[in-house]
Amino acid sequence: MITAIRTELLKLRTTRLAIGMLAVAAGWTGLVAAIEASRAGPGGMVPSLATTAGLRDVLTSTGFALIIAAAYGTTVTSGELRHHTITDTYLDEPNRRQVLTAKVITAGLTGLVFGAVGTIVTTGIGLAFAGAHGDHITIAGGTIARYAAGATVGAGLLAAAGAAIGTLIANQVGAIIAVFAWGFGVEQIIGGVFHHLAPYLPLMASETMAGSTNGGMPPLPKGFTPLPFGAVVGLVAAVALILAVIASTTTVNRDIT
């Protein structure tokens, strides 16, 4: 298994897609954070950065990094089907379930980078804007670190789930569209109509683990109580595991010729 994971990591390091999607995640996350920070204050998008609520909204606006991590995860599995390199992979390792497991783990490890980069961008922008206005930093360093940990872990788990989705759907473009449709469509509808279900939706739960309580992108509905950090980790990990098990017992054994 270790060899399979190393092989998958080598594949990712030698392709430009990972770097491209990471750049997109950083760019969109930074844009959202910059817009919020520049329009903070009375009547703005978020409260003043001199307040805990306002600064927190900017520091935790890592939603784009999370959803793009999930979208990237789908390419880890569907990409080989698209480029017809999966045959060589299966010839090297005939155990398809082991290949899937290695890809899910690899996607999860790579997803951590998306979360880390996203939180570095939002933290840098938030603190830079606050400093430029002479605002006192009202959030402790330990709390900011917890936000960063939540975004990093959340992105990793969502990327692992994305890898399973990529196997289930197989079509790379279709899998990416499905991730964005879920995050910006299905979760928004369910969470907006049934607030009590919002904490249990994978992307929204991951956003709350990253410290977000309001707004964000994708936006969080108001009026719900987030799950504890550990509960969210267990929830999203369970979603990734269930999707991987379904894929391993169904589509992973499809004819690839």
Image (cartoon, rainbow, N blue to C red):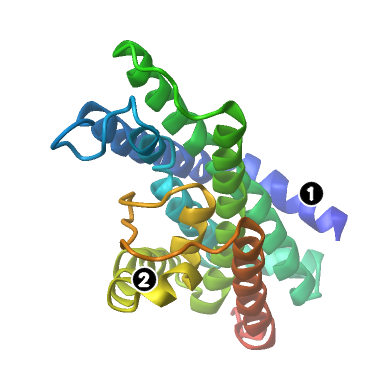
Q: Tag on residue 6?
A: 1
Q: Amino acid at mark 1?
A: Arg
Regarding residue 212, the answer to whether it shows in the image is: yes
Q: Quadrant of residue 61?
A: top left
Q: Element type at marker 2? A: helix
Q: Are the residues tagged 1 and 2 within 8 Å (C-beta)?
A: no
Relative to 199, 253 lies left or right: right
**Residue 243 screen position, x and y as percent:** 60, 77
Q: Tag on residue 187?
A: 2
Q: Earlier in the sequence, mark 1 or mark 2?
A: 1
What residue lies at 54% left-to-right and 53% top-to-bottom?
209
Task: For label 1, count other residues whose C-alpha is less than 10 Å away and answer few (under 14), some (14-19) or many (20+).
Answer: few
The N terminus - image quarter: bottom right
What residue lies at 49% left-to-right and 45% top-to-bottom?
17
What residue lies at 31% left-to-right and 61% top-to-bottom?
222
In the rendered image, the residue lying farthest to the right is 2
Relative to 202, 8 lies left or right: right
Q: Quadrant of residue 238?
A: bottom right
**Residue 239 screen position, x and y as percent:** 60, 73
The C terminus - image quarter: bottom right
Q: Element type at marker 1? A: helix
Instruction: Name above or below for residue 109 compared with residue 19.
Output: below
